[in-house]
Image (spheres, grey):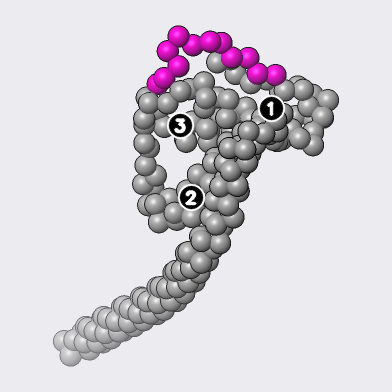
Amino acid sequence: MRDGKKPNREIATIRTQTLFISAMALLMLLAFFSWIKVQRSSQMVKLEQETNKELNRLRMVAESANAAKSTFLNNMSHDIRTPMNAIIGFTNIALKLNPKPEIKTCLDKISDSSEHLLTLINDVLDISRIESGKIQFMPAPVDITEVADTVVSITYGFLSNRNIHFSFHQEALKEPYVLADAVRIREVLVNILGNAVKFTNDSGASHGADG
């Protein structure tokens, strides 16, 4: 009986040791995975900190560039508008002197182009309105025929040093007055015709829309 109990005790001891070793191995494995998790978490925190630092740097660069742009435009606002107003003023003075018809035609074109250019300058310089997307449309009764004539005059200015045939056809309108924003209409038409001139090869042809 004593000899039979000894193997049983040895088996029980082996089982106990096996369970202990297994438990220790499991604990070590859990500790290892916990360590990996902590390391990964630390790396993620570090990466997030570096990302936020870079984003803050880029934000500061963007804000600095925007401030510099606004300062430049504010400083240039008066300097740009002043010569344009002078051109418009002297043109109007010349028109009041009853110039010859061919000179008057040139002065009228200068006046129309100057007024249009000043409008564009005002839009560009009003940077806060542009950046906020609050460009205002101001519809008013306008003679659409006069708007078209102004656009044509400006377009002929584009053609001064080009060998391009430009034709414009305009029908007489029974009701030429419409409610519209003449400034925006001129901008669109001048851009379209300006691109037509730009991308038409010399000796080519560009055609204005019918009135």
Question: Mark 3 is on which residue type?
Answer: Ala
**Marks 1 and 3 in Cβ contact (< 8 Å):** no
Compared to residue 33, the image places residue 79 above or below, namely above
- Split into 4 quadrants, where in the image is the C terminus? top right
- Give neighbour class at mark 3: few <14, some 14-19, many 20+ (Cα, 10 Å): many
The spot of residue 199 in percent (x, y) is: 72, 33
Question: Mark 1 is on which residue type?
Answer: Pro
Q: Which mark sits nearer the N-terminus, 2 or 1?
A: 1
Residue at 45% x, 73% y is 60
Q: Is label 2 or label 1 in front? A: 1
The spot of residue 30 in percent (x, y) is: 31, 78
Mark 1–mark 3 distance (CA, rounded to whole Å)? 27 Å
Secondary structure under badge 1? Answer: helix
Residue designated by label 1:
101
Q: For the magenta stretch, what is the residue range?
A: 167-178
Helix, strand or loop for the magenta stretch, by majority: loop
Secondary structure under badge 2? Answer: helix
User: Does 140 sit left or right of 143 as displayed?
Assistant: left
Secondary structure under badge 3? Answer: helix
User: Does 18 sit left or right of 207 as displayed?
Assistant: left
Q: Would residue 139 be seen by someone viewing this image from the given angle?
A: yes
Question: Mark 2 is on which residue type?
Answer: Asn
Q: Which mark is residue 182?
A: 3
- Split into 4 quadrants, where in the image is the N terminus? bottom left
Q: Residue furthest left?
A: 1
Quadrant assignment, res 18:
bottom left
Residue designated by label 2:
122
